[in-house]
Amino acid sequence: MAQFTNPLSQKLLSKSKYRTILLSAALFLTFDLGVLLPNFLISTNLKQDAVSINLAGRQRMLSQRMTKALLQVKVAKESQKELDTAKQELNKASQLFDDTLIGFEQGKTVTGGDGKPVFLNAVETTNSKEIIVKAKEIWLPYKTKIQAIVSAGDNPSTDFLSDAIAYAEENNLKLLDLMNQLTSEEQQVADNKANMLQLIQTVGLSLALINFFILLSHTLKKLKDGDAEIEKANAEIFALNGKLNKENLRMKQELDITRQVQQMILPKPEELSKIPDLEIAGIMEPASEIGGDYYDIIHHNGQVKIGIGDVTGHGLESGMLMLMVQTAVRTLLINNETNPSKFLDTINRTIYHNVQRMNTDKNMTLSLLDYQDGKVRVSGQHEEILVIRRGGLVQRVDTVDLGLPIGLEEDIYEFIGYADIHLYPGDLVILYTDGITEAEDESSTQYGLKRLIDVAKAHWQKSAEEVKQAVIDDLKSFIGKKEVFDDITLVVLKRKYETKKDMENTVV
C-alpha cells in the first residue's frame, strides 16, 4: 500500500471523520461525471438535431422557390429574356432540395443554411421516415419534369413547362405540408432529447444533494470540536445565498425593465385616436415576462404604417428581436422609404446580421400594411389577414407568397411581393398572431381561425375597440384555466364612416 509522505495527508486519513468527507467528495465527483458525460453526448445530438430542424425549414422555402422559378422560366421563355437566369435558379433550388431530401433519408454531407458543408443525419423516427417516403413519391416525378426543362437548352418545350407547372400547382402544397410535418417531427425528437437531458441532470443533482445532506448529518455527529468550522461553512453558505438572491433580484429587475420597455413602445390610445380615417385597437399579452410578438401603428406624413409579427419562441432573445424590428421599421419610415420590397429587405438584412452575431436561431414572420385614402398595401409573410366587409362578408388575404421569415436568410428581396386591398367605410381588418388561433382549451382543442372569423362577423358593425374586446373575451372564455404558452396579439382596424348618415344607413 502506498505511503503518504505529506504529514497533513496522514493526519487527515488517521481520523474516520475525514475519511467520510473524502468518500462523500468522491461520490459527489462520481455523480458529477455521471451527469456531464450524458450531457455532452445528448448536447452533441441536439446540435445535429438543430441542423435537421433548420434544413427541414429550408425545404419548405425551397419548394416555394421551385414553383416561383418555374413561373419565371415560363415568363422568360415567352419574353425571350433572362431565360438562363430563371433556369439556373430552378436548377439550383431543385438540386438543393433533392440533395437535402437524400440527406434526410440516408445521412450525408449537404449544403447548410450558411452555404457551408454540414453533415445531415438520416431521420430516426418512424413518422419521419414515412414523411420522407411520401415526399419522395411527390418529388421524384417533379424532379424528372424539372430536369427535362433544365436540360432542354435555350428553348424548353412549352408542353414540358405546362406539365411541370401543372404538377407544381397540384402538389406544391402537399410537399410543403410534408416538410412542415418533418420540421415538427424533428423538433419533437430534439424536445425528447432535451427532456431526457433535463431528467439526467435532475437525477444527478438529486443524488448530489442527498449525498451532501448525508455528509452534513454525519459531520455534525462526528465533529464534536468542529463548531467553528461549521459556523464558518454556514456563513459562507449564507453569503452565497445572499449573493444568489441579489443576482436573481437584479436579473428580475432587468427582465421587468425590458418588459416595461416593450409595453411602453406599443401604440398609445391617444396616438391612435389622432389618425383621421381609421379606428384602431390593439393588444399584446406576452406568455412570459418578455414577449416575442410585435405590432406597431405609425402615422407619418399622411400615411399609416401597420406592422404585425411573431418571433419564434418568447423570452429575452425574442423580446430583443422584437425591439430591433420595431426600431428598424420606425427608422426606415422616418427616412421616407416607401418601396415595400426595399423596406422589408432592409429590415431582414439588419435582423439577419444581428441574429448571426447573437448566435441564435430566432426568426420572425412579419407583415407590413401601408394605408392611405382607403387603400391598403400588404407585404411580408405572416398569418392570414381578415377583411370583414359591411354586412359580415369575409375576405381572407393569404400572405405566404408575399415574403419569407425575417432573419432566416440574408437576401429575400426576390421573394417579397404585395397585395392591395380597398377598404370602404365600415370595413374591418383583423390582424393576429398564432397565439390566438393555436390557443387551447382544457381538452387541448385549438381556438382556430374559424371561431375568430365567426366572432368578428358577429360584431363587425361595432367599433374597433368593441370588436377587439369581443374577440379577447371569447378567447379567454374558451381557454378557461388552461395555461397559455404563446403570446397573444390582436389588432383591429376599421375605416370610419364619412358621415353619420352613412353609418345609420349601414345594414346590420
Image (tube, rainbow, N blue to C red):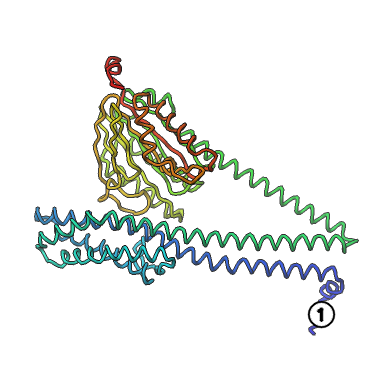
Q: Position of residue 165 (x, y in %)?
A: 18, 56
Residue projecting furthest to the right: 224
Judging depth in this view, the residue of 378 and 125 nearest the camera is 125
Pinpoint residue 448: horizontal percent, then vertical percent: 40, 42
Residue 335 visible in this rendered orientation of the protein: no
Which amino acid type corresponds to the residue marked 1 in the rendered image? Answer: Thr
Classify 10 Å Cα crowding around label 1: few (below 14), some (14-19), many (20 and above). Answer: few
| Image quarter of residue 344 | top left
Percent position of residue 203, x then y: 65, 62
Q: Is residue 58 above or below residue 120?
A: above
Which residue is more in the foreground, 448 or 409?
A: 448
Q: Secondary structure at mark 1?
A: loop
- Quadrant holding the N terminus: bottom right
Q: In the image shown, does 424 or 414 lie closer to the viewer?
A: 424
Rendered view: 206 above or below 105? above
Position of 239 with respect to 44 (left or right) is: right
According to the image, label 1 marks what residue? 5
